[in-house]
Amino acid sequence: MELVCKASAKYVPLMNDVCEPLFELLRQQSALEKEMFERDKQLDIEKEKAGIPSYQTAPGWNELMAEYKERLRALLEKYCTENQLSRGFSISYGEPQTFGYVNGDCLAEFKMRNADKANVEFHYEMGGLKRKHKFMMRLVDGKWLIDELYYGFEGKSNWHIRNF
């Protein structure tokens, strides 16, 4: 991952304070998503061995989803404002992971114009598409938290709001 600072000189010292917690969240969320994906695959293998039809839910799947939802919520509550949490979150997972780019080839841009707000944009490629995420960070009680999350596509100027 390459990190580029596009903030005025007075905000450059805040770059790591803003970015490191965000990077940590994305790494943890990706690890959790990967774990759930692998455990779900194992449930499917066991379901097939037991002769359960593919259209039926695997035994233990509902419990796995409940665990995932609980663990994801606990993780996000540490890093997100109430504004972002109020949008809800998806308990989907897959391969590659939604924010797995943080562990690989991507460009992160730090932008800051106000002392209590910053943006971190990620530019990456997934599935042959050039994509981007924008995390709007807000300083709340001395801690940088995600206040809004957007996605978009390279070459397009518009952003679309999303949940985790």
Image: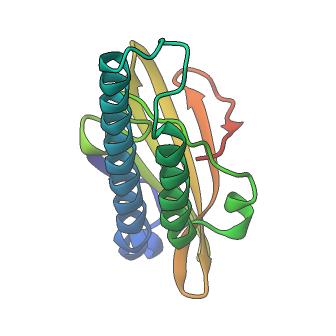
Side (left or right) of 163 relative to 14 = right
**Numbered-mark total:** 0
Query: x and y percent of residue 143 in the render?
Result: 52, 81
Residue 51, quarter of the rendered image: top left
Identify whether 141 is placed above or below 95. Answer: below
Residue 107's spot in the image, x, y percent?
Answer: 34, 40
- Foreground: 36 or 79? 36
Q: Is residue 6 left or right of residue 107?
A: right
In depth, the one of 44 and 127 nearer the eye is 44
Q: Is residue 154 above or below residue 159?
A: above
Q: Residue at x 29, y 18 (%)?
A: 49
Query: In the image, what residue occupies the spot 35% across and 16% down?
Result: 48
In the image, 26: left or right of 116?
left
Asked whether the viewer can see residue 29, the reply is: yes
**Which residue corresponds to the image point at 33% horizontal and 38% vertical from the top-left?**
39
Q: Evaluate whether residue 107 shows in this view.
A: no
Indicate the position of residue 72 as horizontal and vertical percent values: 50, 56
Task: Relative to 48, say whether 98 is above or below.
Answer: below
Q: Position of residue 18 (x, y in %)?
A: 44, 69
State the residue lying farthest toward the bottom. Answer: 141
At 55% from the left edge and 41% from the top edge, which residue is drawn?
A: 62
Splitting the image into 4 quarters, where does residue 46 fall? top left
